[in-house]
Image: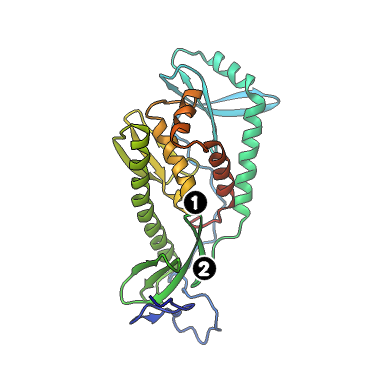
């Protein structure tokens, strides 16, 4: 199959060009702005709370806020995300015991909160992607090249040999429409691939999951409910297959162990022995992602 050159359209299609604007210079952006003027971007807002009760505790001279969820687990668990500290504790454990457990882990908690803040700030400093013909987007651990052309209807075609995603756009399409089209295409690819990997690793682990859905969580790559429903973040499609497989193995292991105990990691290791390396690499790759969809 002949490869399309830069900016070339598939056979029978007209190359995408910007609407006439009085003689725009070659190389100008290929998409015209929306017809309605856009407001200036507002400062990033704090992520919405998850609805869990929130408490405050003085720790090492800091007022530490955390969300508390009660569960049937047998020990107190801690998780750090962009919302801060989340604590999961058995129903029988008192607030005083929870606060004492936080103080006992304060060095770890405060260091992880600082690391999370630094990673988030570094990611927000990255320049946003320019949505023009020829731009590169992260896909399955590498990059795909976006090719834009004018079409009578919106359409998408991916060439795995050249790693080019051809997007046919109607004349006058906006950048917002293009971003939604690319996101929709990536979600479709993620759904099909993740389903295949879940089936493969579930058979290896000897478990069955009851359902699967994509998530758009800001800080979690996956989850598993007590009903054995697996949710995987569609943005994993940006990463290589081994990293996707690590998250798949991780969530499937929760069907057997709803915790992160040594028994849980032993189950992960049965089907994904290199989980420690994958966990560290996933953290690094996530920090390297450009700002794509805001």
Q: Any mark on residue 220, and which? A: none
x, y (%) of residue 207? Answer: 33, 32
Residue carrying label 2: 135
Furthest toward the bottom, the residue is 23
Which element carries disc 2, helix, strand or loop?
loop
The one nearer the camera, 255 or 290, is 255
The one nearer the camera, 10 or 206, is 206
Classify residue 48 as left or right of residue 194.
right
Say which quarter of the image contains residue 65: top right
In the image, is residue 80 above or below residue 71? below
Q: CA distance from mark 1 to mark 2?
A: 18 Å
x, y (%) of residue 55? Answer: 54, 25
Please rate how many residues cluster around mark 1, counting C-alpha atoms within 10 Å: few if below 14, some from 14 to 19, many from 20: some
**Tag 2 or tag 1, which sits nearer the N-term?**
2
Would residue 181 be seen by someone viewing this image from the given angle?
yes
Residue drawn 54% across the image and 44% down it: 282
Residue drawn 30% across the image and 38% down it: 211
Say which quarter of the image contains residue 99: top right
x, y (%) of residue 144? Answer: 48, 64
In the image, is residue 111 above or below residue 42? above
Classify residue 271 as left or right of residue 127.
left
Which element carries disc 1, helix, strand or loop?
loop
The one nearer the camera, 76 or 259, is 259
Residue carrying label 1: 239
Please rate how many residues cluster around mark 2, counting C-alpha atoms within 10 Å: few if below 14, some from 14 to 19, many from 20: some
Residue drawn 55% across the image and 48% down it: 286
Furthest toward the left, the residue is 210
In the image, is residue 231 above or below residue 34? above
Would residue 221 be seen by someone viewing this image from the given angle?
no
Quadrant of the rendering where the N terminus is positioned:
bottom left
- The chosen color scheme is rainbow
């Amino acid at each position: 199959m002949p490869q399309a050159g830069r900016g070339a359209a598939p056979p029978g299609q007209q190359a995408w060009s910007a609407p006439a604007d009085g003689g725009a210079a070659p190389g100008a952006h290929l998409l015209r702005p929306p017809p309605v003027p856009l407001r200036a971007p507002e400062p990033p807002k704090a992520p919405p709370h998850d609805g869990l009760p929130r408490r405050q505790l003085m720790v090492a001279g800091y007022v530490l806020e955390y969300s508390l969820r009660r569960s049937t687990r047998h020990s107190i668990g801690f998780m750090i995300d962009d919302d801060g500290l989340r604590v999961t504790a058995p129903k029988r454990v008192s607030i005083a015991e929870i606060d004492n457990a936080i103080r006992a882990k304060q060095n770890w908690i405060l260091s992880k909160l600082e690391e999370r803040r630094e990673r988030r700030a570094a990611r927000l400093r990255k320049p946003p992607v320019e949505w023009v013909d020829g731009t590169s987007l992260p896909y399955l651990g590498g990059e795909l090249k976006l090719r834009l052309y004018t079409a009578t209807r919106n359409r998408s075609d991916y060439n795995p040999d050249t790693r080019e995603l051809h997007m046919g756009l109607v004349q006058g399409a906006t950048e917002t429409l293009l971003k939604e089209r690319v996101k929709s295409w990536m979600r479709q690819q993620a759904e099909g691939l993740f389903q295949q990997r879940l089936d493969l690793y579930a058979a290896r682990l000897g478990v069955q999951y009851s359902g699967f859905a994509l998530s758009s969580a800001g800080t979690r790559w996956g989850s598993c409910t007590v009903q054995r429903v697996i949710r995987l973040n569609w943005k994993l499609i940006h990463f290589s297959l081994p990293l996707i497989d690590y998250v798949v193995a991780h969530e499937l292991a929760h069907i057997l162990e709803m915790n992160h105990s040594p028994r849980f990691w032993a189950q992960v290791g049965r089907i994904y022995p290199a989980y420690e390396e994958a966990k560290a690499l996933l953290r690094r790759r996530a920090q390297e992602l450009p700002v794509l969809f805001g």
